[in-house]
Amino acid sequence: MITLDPRAAARAAHAASSTRPATAVLHDGPDARLVVFRLAPGQAVPPHRSASTVTLAVLEGAGVLSGGDGERACAAGDVAVFQPDELHGMRAEGGELLLLATITPRPGSR
């Protein structure tokens, strides 16, 4: 068994620049990749597509998730599922936003 602490990993994640959200790969297995995000207030990941199913779990904070059908507010405890090739993005509002993304199948495994 592997046990992980996504909140701690998101808090410790580093960003490529101060204007971009911090990310870290939490786990990279043959079937799924887990990625944590830490977005500062006002930061966003622009809507994009993935060939895989993407599940976003809000760990802490509040913000906005965007998808093919528009934008929806999100808060800690919320989970959103995006089908393959569905637009998805996120942004923090008011405070820091921590997210866990589960990507299945793992990118590059198809």
Image (tube, grey):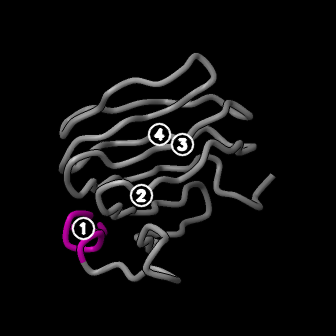
Q: Nearer the viewer, mark 4 or mark 3?
A: 3
Decide which of 8, 14 is in the foreground and name it.
14
**Helix, strand or loop at disc 1?**
loop
**Which of the labelled discs sits on residue 89, or is there none?**
3
Distance of label 1 from label 2 (alpha carbons): 29 Å
Residue lying at 22% horizontally and 36% vertically, measured from the top left: 75
Amino acid type, mark 3: Gly
Question: Residue 21 lies in what quarter of the image?
Answer: bottom left
| Residue at image mark 1 | 3
**Helix, strand or loop at disc 4?**
strand
Amino acid type, mark 4: Thr
The number of callouts visible is 4
Label 1: how many residues lie within 10 Å, few (<14), some (14-19) or many (20+)? Answer: few
Q: How far across and how far down the image is residue 53, in percent?
A: 61, 38
**Which of the labelled discs sits on residue 43, or is there none?**
2
- What range of the chain is rendered magenta? 1-11
Decide which of 47, 42 is in the foreground and name it.
42
- Label whose residue precedes the other's in the sequence (3 or 1): 1
Distance of label 4 from label 3 (alpha carbons): 11 Å
Residue lying at 32% horizontally and 27% vertically, measured from the top left: 73
